[in-house]
Structure formats: C-alpha cells, structure tokens
C-alpha cells in the first residue's frame, strides 16, 4: 500500500499510539482533585507548553479542541464582539473557515473573500484593497490544503497593521505546522489553528493558539480549557499530539527530503498533458495536478485498484462538486474535474514515489485511450 | 387499565377464501417486525392488539407497525375492565390541545346498561365540563374519542387514529428484482411494489473505477433504508465497466444508453431466474430522460421476453416521487452526489426514439453473450 493522501489525514506514529495507550491506563478525569487526576492535568499543561514552544510563541495560550474545524469556529465566534463590522476570509480557505464566512454573510455581516493569484497564493494587492478601518477580523489559510501554496503571514500582518490595526488576525495552520518553519511571534498573528491527525497523531484533538485575544466560549459547560472549551479533555489524543510535536524532527531536513519526493513525482508525469498547480514555492507536501480530458475521480479509483491512495481534492470538500480554490486560480470548472491531489509525508520513500508516479502516468494513458 | 395498540387491516377483507393465507402472512410480518421488543401481540374478535409493552417503547413499536404493509391504521388505546364508573372516570382525565371533538361509543356488549347514543352524550358532557374551551362537532372534529365496549368484558378507549402503510402483506405477491441505481426513483419503485405484497431482491450495476465504492455503499444504504417496508434485501452487485467500455469502443455513441439498458435487462432476466424473481422492477418514469420515452422503453422491453418489467412510477410526476422518497426516508441518501454508472460515457446527443432494428444492428458489433456471462460470473451478493 502506498498512501499519498497525507493532507487528508496521516497514519498515527507508533510513539503517538503508545502515548495514547498509556492514557487509557491513566484514564483519570483531569478535573478530579485526587493525585492521579492532578498528574493528568499537569501532563496536559506540559503538552500546552510543548506545542506553544514549537509554534514560536512566547506569550499566549493553547486551547485544546476536538478538531481544527472547532478551533476555527472558536477563533471566529469566540473573538466576535457586537461592534464587529467586516470579516475578511480568502478563496483558499478550508471549508471549516470559508463556510463560517458564508454563514456570517447570511447573517448580514459585511464579509469579503480575498481572491487568489494564478499560483494559488492570496492576492496581496487585492487584500490591501479589501482591508479597511471597518475590518474587524481576518482569517487566512497558512498553507493551502488544495495546492500547498504558502501565504506570507508576516506580509499579511503588515497589511493589517497598515490598514486595520485593531482587526484580529487568525491563520489556519493545519497544513503548515510541523512541515514549514513557524514562528508566531515573528508572523504576528493573534490566533492560529493546528490539528493532531495531520501530523501523525490521532483524530479528536486539535488546538487554537491565542496570543492575547479575549475569547468567549462557544461551548458551555464545566469550564475546562479556561472555560473556553468545556467538555472532559481527550487526554490520550492531547498527549499524543504532544508526542507528535516532540517527534517532528528537523523541519528543514524533512522539507528538503519531501521536496525531493515531489520533484521525483513531477519528473515522471511532466510529459503528460497535465497542469501542475503547485509550483516550487509551494509546500512540498502537497502536489495538485490537473489532467486533461479525464475525471480525477476515475484516476483516484484506478490508483486505488493498485493499492495507491491519492485524492481528488480536500477530503473535507470531496463530497461537493467543483473545487473553489482551483477555480479561483483561473482554472475552468471543466478542467478542474481532471484534478488530483497527491500529498506526501516524511515517511514516504523515494521508491514509493517512483512506483506511484509511474502508475499514475500509466493509469492516465490507459484511461485516455479507453475514452478516446 | 393498561395501554394497548389496536391495529386495523384493509384489503384483506376482500380476499374471500384466501383471507386466512393473507392474514397469516400479515401476522407473521407483524411478529417479525416486533421481534426484540418486549410486547405481546394477539388477535381478538376481528382486530389485532399489541399489549404488555414498556411505555417507553411505544413510539418505537408504532413506528415499526406503521411501516407494515397490510395494516391501514392503528390507534393508541387504553384497555379497561368494562365498568361504567371506570369509563366515566378515565374519560374525565383526558386532556386536549385541539378545538373540537366528538365521542363515539360502540357497544358490542349488549349487557352494558346504557345505550350507545345516550352514553356518548354523557361522556361528551364530562369532557366539556373538564375542558370548557372545547367544542363538540359531530362532523368536522379535530379528534374523536372512541369507546369500544367489547363482548369480552373489556372496553377500549381510543383517541387518535394513526395511518399505516396500507397495501397488501409483504410476501403475498411473489418476489421481484428491483434495479437499484442509487437515484431517487428506484427505491420508491421498490417500495411501491412491496406495498402490493411483492418481496424485493436488488440488482445494482457499478462501473468502478469510473464510479466510486461510495456509489456502491450508497445503494447498500438505500436497500437498508427501504427494508423496514420491503423486508431484508439481498442485493446483487454486478460489474458493468467492461460492458460500457466495449459499447463505447464499438457502437455509435448516441446508442450508448439504449444498448446499456438492454444489456442490463438481459442480465436482470438471468439474475431474476437465479433469484426466483417473477418480475423486474424499475424506477422508470415516462419522459423523465431520453431513455424513458415510450420508444426507448419498448426497445428495452424487447431485449428479453422471459420476465415482465414492472414500472410502478411510470405515470408519476418527479415531485410526487420525491414526496414518497422523503416520506419513506430514502431522499437524503438518494441525492448524495456520487456518480452512478448511467452518467459514465454519457453521450452528448442520446437517441430519444430508438428503432429496434438499428439498435440491434449496433449491438451486433458486440459479443453480448460473452460480456453478459463475464459480468454475471463476477456478481457479488450482499445481504442488506
């Protein structure tokens, strides 16, 4: 089996599973006042510190949530105030933020979606135009889950300071954390979302970093997570996320290694009638391709028959037709249908990439022959 | 006093000497549906009664009963020992959130001391005294309180009538092979035939890798969703990719759909024989798409002559089909956007009024028998 859908989810590492299992034995409710509970509570506290350090944030706090979707919702709805007027999202946003924008628009707020350039990045000139003194909240995706395009958070923050210094800046870092170098102090963002299962930890735990934003809870109850996210903590998954962070290794080395995998993949399909939507400035972990004259879905299933797993697009939006991000990059809806996404992990081998890329090329050739 | 559910059946009355058979099947279906729920079920002078159940299970039992074909309606009731004072007392406790009502008394027990019409008025008076905002209306009433004084010494007091699925008991009209595509129509077609007593076996054609495993899963879900009405369904999954590729390769594109459907029917006829089905059921609906014109259906019919094709939705509007689909709970699954095999290799201009000779000529370019044999040999059977 060759798994190349790591942007959808990743295989939990042995270390993460071991950590998770450890906390099935140390199952105590962190809210308890006896020693085993207090120990678990302290462990969670240490996870918070490990994650915050890895994010390069010297101040602020970490709020654990059940998913990145929940963290994104907490970021927007938790920081919302009655005087909020205008919200800015981007066309590259993951549905878990983009659809918050759609909902806010339906509720009558002034919402704008920043367009993209043809390389999939935020159009900074357009963003500068969109931002104004009415802007209360900006949310951007750090690394596009569709193309791997990296948005320059520092530059966006500078625009924020120039145009709307009071606006809150949130970034969705789900595809960035652990893969590219991150320093939230340097970027200057206020809120940042990460997710465990995208980095070899388990599903069911994500978190929102908050610098000095006063948040209001979106879920009420027993007051866990500083009263911002009530509900008994998913201790095993939280501690697994800590383990995953401890095992990131050398980001630069991993980056170069995966870049090499991506280059190898591209080398083997470059002669086909196919557009590469992820240029070399993108995160090497994601490769978006648009093939001519076929459906991406058929290619995915043909690869599946060979025990190789890729996707047509983000797993969270694959139930819908079309692809907003790619269409925003000026790819026609007719062509978008031929798109596939290959997403790598540092655990993929060069041999796997050679096999998968050749099989994809072979599948395409077979398919185009049958359809002609 | 205990809570009971009274069941009424419809057309079985019409079945003369065969009534016992129909009733036997219905009883067995009711028992099968209530299996696992702690309750008693018995027949008492012309009616069925479900009793001795946990009050918390009542809504589950009613939900199951309303989906059994052959039952026309049911009523929640209380059963009390026939005693005039007990009846008065119970009636005085009833509360209403409607505006108008009537009381109907039936008195099979002629030893009961008060005549029906007099007792009706008396009980109506009790209700009015306790619910001063209510009004009596003998014709256009919001609710009817039925007091049924039986010869058995028991009285049943019923308030509301709940509609059941109607039709004939499932299993009294043989077995039919339902072509399940995954769309809105076919599950409704299966439901309609089961309503007339036909048991259902399913057949689905899939086109992996052009269609997804999700499309197969969707059809399995649909088969499960209609099973409260149609019983557990055996689902035959037939691969269709190779046949589509061959048609695409050899035949004129405008005949793609027509030839596909004819081959599907030929396969269906063979599967029907294997599964002991007496009919093929489709969700076709006149004029809905190019393959559903009278000419297209005629050409499809001529593909095989062994098994009749039933098209219960032929004269329905799409709106009506959607309404039933929502009612039986298949709509939300049916509209999931997974491609089915009919959308693969879709020609730009499919022939709307195909001529049999032309279609046969196009088909002759294929080794149909061989293709069918191969497809059938790869059929997968799923018990839903």
Image: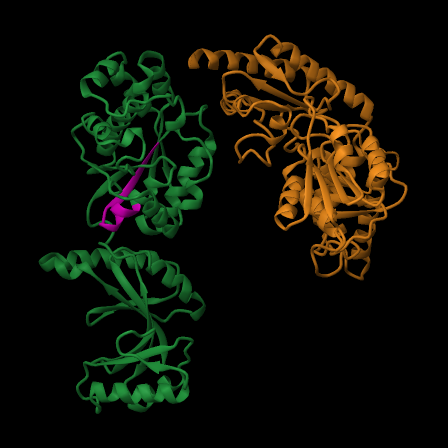
Chain colours: A orange, B green
Relative image position of residue B66 (x, y in whole percent): 33, 59
Let me know if residue A169 appears in the view: yes
Residue B355 lies in quadrant = top left
Q: Quadrant of the N terminus of chain B?
A: bottom left
Q: From this viewpoint, which residue is outermost toward the top?
A: A271
Residue A127 lies in quadrant = top right
Q: Is residue B184 above or below residue A223?
A: above
Give the magenta-colored segment's residue range. Answer: B191-204
Does B202 appear in magenta? yes
Residue name at image x 68 percent, y 15 percent: A350
Relative image position of residue A141 (x, y in whole percent): 72, 34
Q: Is residue B241 above or below residue B68?
A: above
Q: Is residue B328 left or right of residue A54?
A: left
Relative image position of residue B99 (x, y in whole percent): 38, 77
Does A163 appear in magenta? no
Q: From this viewpoint, which residue is outermost toward the right?
A: A58
Q: Is residue A29 above or below residue A252?
A: below
Let me know if residue A22 appears in the view: no
Residue situated in front as seen by the camera: A352 or B354? B354
């Amino acid at each position: 089996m060759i798994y190349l859908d790591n942007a959808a989810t990743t295989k939990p590492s042995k270390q993460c599973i071991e950590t998770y299992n450890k906390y099935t034995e140390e199952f105590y409710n962190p809210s308890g006042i006896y020693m085993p509970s207090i120990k678990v509570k302290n462990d969670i506290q240490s996870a918070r510190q490990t994650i915050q350090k890895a994010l390069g944030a010297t101040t602020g706090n970490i709020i654990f949530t059940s998913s990145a979707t929940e963290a994104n919702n907490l970021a927007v709805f938790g920081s919302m105030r009655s005087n909020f007027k205008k919200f800015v999202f981007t066309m590259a946003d993951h549905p878990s933020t983009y659809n918050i924008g759609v909902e806010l628009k339906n509720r009558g707020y002034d919402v704008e979606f920043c367009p993209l350039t043809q390389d999939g990045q935020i159009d900074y000139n357009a963003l500068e135009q969109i931002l104004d003194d009415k802007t209360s909240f900006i949310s951007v995706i750090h690394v596009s889950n569709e193309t791997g395009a990296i948005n320059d958070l520092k530059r966006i923050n500078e625009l924020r300071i120039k145009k709307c210094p009071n606006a809150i800046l949130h970034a969705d870092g789900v595809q960035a954390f652990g893969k590219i170098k991150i320093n939230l102090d340097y970027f200057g963002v206020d809120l940042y979302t990460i997710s465990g299962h995208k980095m070899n930890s388990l599903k069911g735990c994500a978190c929102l970093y908050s610098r000095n934003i006063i948040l209001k809870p979106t879920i009420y109850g027993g007051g866990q997570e500083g009263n911002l996210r009530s509900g008994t903590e998913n201790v095993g998954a939280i501690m697994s996320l800590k383990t995953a962070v401890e095992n990131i290794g050398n980001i630069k080395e991993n980056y170069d290694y995966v870049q090499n995998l991506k280059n190898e993949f591209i080398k083997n399909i470059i002669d086909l009638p196919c557009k590469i939507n992820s240029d070399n400035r993108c995160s090497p972990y994601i490769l978006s391709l648009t093939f001519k004259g076929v459906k991406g879905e058929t290619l995915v299933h043909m690869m599946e028959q060979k025990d190789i797993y890729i996707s047509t697009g983000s797993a969270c939006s694959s139930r819908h037709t079309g692809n907003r991000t790619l269409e925003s990059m000026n790819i026609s809806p007719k062509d978008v249908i031929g798109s596939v996404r290959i997403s790598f992990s540092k655990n993929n081998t060069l041999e796997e990439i050679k096999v998968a890329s050749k099989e994809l090329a072979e599948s395409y050739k077979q398919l185009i022959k049958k359809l002609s | 006093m205990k809570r009971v559910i009274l069941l009424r059946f419809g057309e079985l009355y019409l079945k003369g000497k065969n009534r016992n058979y129909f009733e036997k099947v219905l009883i067995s279906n009711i028992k099968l549906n209530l299996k696992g729920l702690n309750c008693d079920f018995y027949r008492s002078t012309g009616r069925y009664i479900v009793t001795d159940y946990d009050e918390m299970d009542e809504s589950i039992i009613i939900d199951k009963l309303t989906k059994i074909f052959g039952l026309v309606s049911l009523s929640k009731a209380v059963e009390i020992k026939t005693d005039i004072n007990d009846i008065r007392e119970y009636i005085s406790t009833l509360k209403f959130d409607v505006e108008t009502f009537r009381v109907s008394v039936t008195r099979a027990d002629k030893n009961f001391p008060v005549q029906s019409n007099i007792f009706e008025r008396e009980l109506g008076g009790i209700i009015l005294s306790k619910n001063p905002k209510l009004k009596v209306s003998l014709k256009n009433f919001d609710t009817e309180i039925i007091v049924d004084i039986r010869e058995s010494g028991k009285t049943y007091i019923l308030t509301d009538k709940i509609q059941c699925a109607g039709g004939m008991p499932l299993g009294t009209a043989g077995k039919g092979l339902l072509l399940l595509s995954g769309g809105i129509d076919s599950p409704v077609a299966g439901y309609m035939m089961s309503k007339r007593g036909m048991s259902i076996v399913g057949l689905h054609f899939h086109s992996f890798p052009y269609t997804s495993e999700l499309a197969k899963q969707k059809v399995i879900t649909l088969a499960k969703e209609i099973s409260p009405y149609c019983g557990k369904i055996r689902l035959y999954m037939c691969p269709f990719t190779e046949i589509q590729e061959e048609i695409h390769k050899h035949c004129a594109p405008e005949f793609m759909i027509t030839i596909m459907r004819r081959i599907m029917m030929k396969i269906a006829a063979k599967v029907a024989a294997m599964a002991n089905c007496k009919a093929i059921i489709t969700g076709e609906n006149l004029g809905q798409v190019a393959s559903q014109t009278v000419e297209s259906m005629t050409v499809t019919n001529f593909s095989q002559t062994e098994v009749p094709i039933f098209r219960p939705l032929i004269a329905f509007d799409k709106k009506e089909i959607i309404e039933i689909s929502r009612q039986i709970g298949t709509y939300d699954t049916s509209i999931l956007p997974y491609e089915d095999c009919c959308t693969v290799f879709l020609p730009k201009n499919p022939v709307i009024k195909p001529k049999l000779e032309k279609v046969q000529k196009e088909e002759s370019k294929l080794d149909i028998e061989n293709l069918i044999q191969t497809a059938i040999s790869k059929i997968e059977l799923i018990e839903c």
